[in-house]
Amino acid sequence: MPYNIAMISDNFFPQPGGVESHMYQLSSKLIDRGHKVIIITHAYTGRTGVRYLTNGLKVYHVPFFVIYRETTFPTVFSFFPIFRNIVIREQIEIVHGHASLSSLCHEAILHARTMGLRTVFTDHSLFGFADAASILTNKLLKFTLSDVDHVICVSHTCKENTVLRASLDPLMVSVIPNAVVAENFQPLSHTSSYTQHRRDAPGPPPRLGPHDTITIVVISRLFYNKGTDLLIAAIPRILASNPNVRFIIAGTGPKAIDLEQMIERNVLQDRVLLLGPVRHEEVRDVMVRGHIYLHPSLTEAFGTVIVEAASCGLYVVCTRVGGIPEVLPRHMTEFAKPEEDDIVTATNRAIAALRVGKVRTELFHNQVKQMYSWTDVAQRTERVYDGISGVLSHDEFYQGAGAGGGWSATRGRAGVQSFALIERLKRYYGCGIWAGKLFCLCVIVDYLLFVILEIFAPRSRIDIARNWPKKVFKDSKDKEVDGSKDTGIGRKRSARHRREQREDSS
């Protein structure tokens, strides 16, 4: 059945990133499958109010104060009136939040539960348990997920981390990975001129000679957790031992100045090219200029960028941290410990493997295309929605997960979270001696605010937004069907709509 879904996070376009791409691609595929999806995020420079993207995806840019890394200042309650207005206007049934550090996400899930809406949370990151920032983040996550219907993680490592951080029942957490649009990340071998050349000279591509230049590409936010310090330390050593190697680095962040100073200090201006920030649609053009993709991250829940790199035909050198080992098969990657010496050694191994023709990178694109699909991600997410909405019974929800060919994604407690205030308070009260009481107070205030809004800003005064018209095409029998048919749903248009069409034509 079709749902009205609101995707909510501080992280969305025009800011580039994995969460941003995940939300956009998942929303587009859900729209193709017949659902209505909107996105709620904060305002960016030049982007305030309502915007429409491809496929009729509506984006609400809410003007809130941004404090750090495009995350809004936590308001707790002041977001509620705007959120309620949007939810009623768009007739939202499911609120789907993304990212542990998104203030809008946490607040939206709290308000949605107060309004009696089903909620889903997707975690895209890993956090520790010792430093102050992680402790506070984990407590906030425990607060939000105490009253959520279902949780989705992008890798099994991410699931284990989230279950521990938020003290969750593992059965209510799904594992649904990210994906890539392989058509947008084609290697140069898929261009017409190269294809014609290979047609004239079949077989594997020629080996890189000992004097041929090998280009190593790095596309990343230049932050500490992305391993920029390791990159800065490793680059001079890699270039010193490999005279015919150069780097192309794209990205921006607080560590950019350190990277520039390293280049100046070692006089590497002719061998290290800094591109600065690049748009997501330009990532492929940067990647195909290289042979190796280096990803020295210190923590990573999934690492979509390494899938994009492999799809472009690059041999991937990455650290064995977080969920990265789950992402690509062994023949596409060269793993290293998150240490300077090991990254240098792994990169040298990758260079040597390419020079002797040991790695068949020209095969990577088709292999990645078969492994990852956003349509598959949308289908699995849709099944989670069916579970929490009661379309699937508890037994069907479990049985379907067990029959999913090794997929544990939908093992969850289908729709068991009660909306009753007393039940919600019981769940929050168990979050800690002091935190539990504070969380209960927040929920009570939120409920009172909801009652006040219902009285002084009744729903009858809020206009219902018109839905974007669905795509219609003709099938092989020349019958008009809903545009979602090509994705497997195949729902025919309603009898009323067809009757109206006949009346109009007559």
Image (spheres, rainbow, N blue to C red):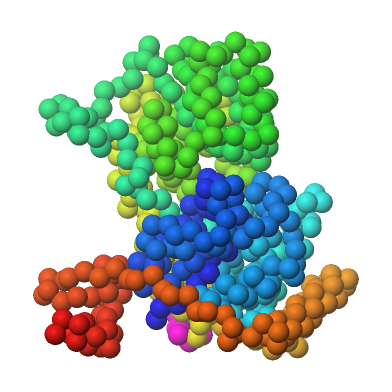
Magenta span includes 175: no
Quarter of the image that includes the N terminus: bottom left
Secondary structure predominantly adopted by residues drawn in magenta: helix
Q: Position of residue 245 (x, y in %)?
A: 46, 18
14 sits to left or right of 371: right
* Segment colored magenta: 391-399
41 or 275: nearer the viewer? 41
2 sits to left or right of 347: left
- Count of numbered marks: 0
Vertical position of residue 439 compared to residue 312: above or below: below
Q: Quadrant of residue 48?
A: bottom right
344 sits to left or right of 502: right
Q: Is residue 405 visible?
A: no
Vertical position of residue 152 compared to residue 272: above or below: below
Q: Quadrant of residue 506?
A: bottom left
Vertical position of residue 408 compared to residue 219: above or below: below
Q: Position of residue 382 (x, y in %)?
A: 44, 72
Q: Position of residue 275 (x, y in %)?
A: 51, 27
Name the residue at the right extreme: 434
Q: Is residue 133 visible?
A: yes
Identify which residue is drawn at 71% across, 64% down.
Answer: 141
Vertical position of residue 268 compared to residue 286: above or below: above
Q: Position of residue 45 (x, y in %)?
A: 59, 47
Identify which residue is drawn at 57% across, 72% down.
Answer: 86
Identify which residue is drawn at 52% across, 61% down.
Answer: 50
482 or 397: nearer the viewer? 482
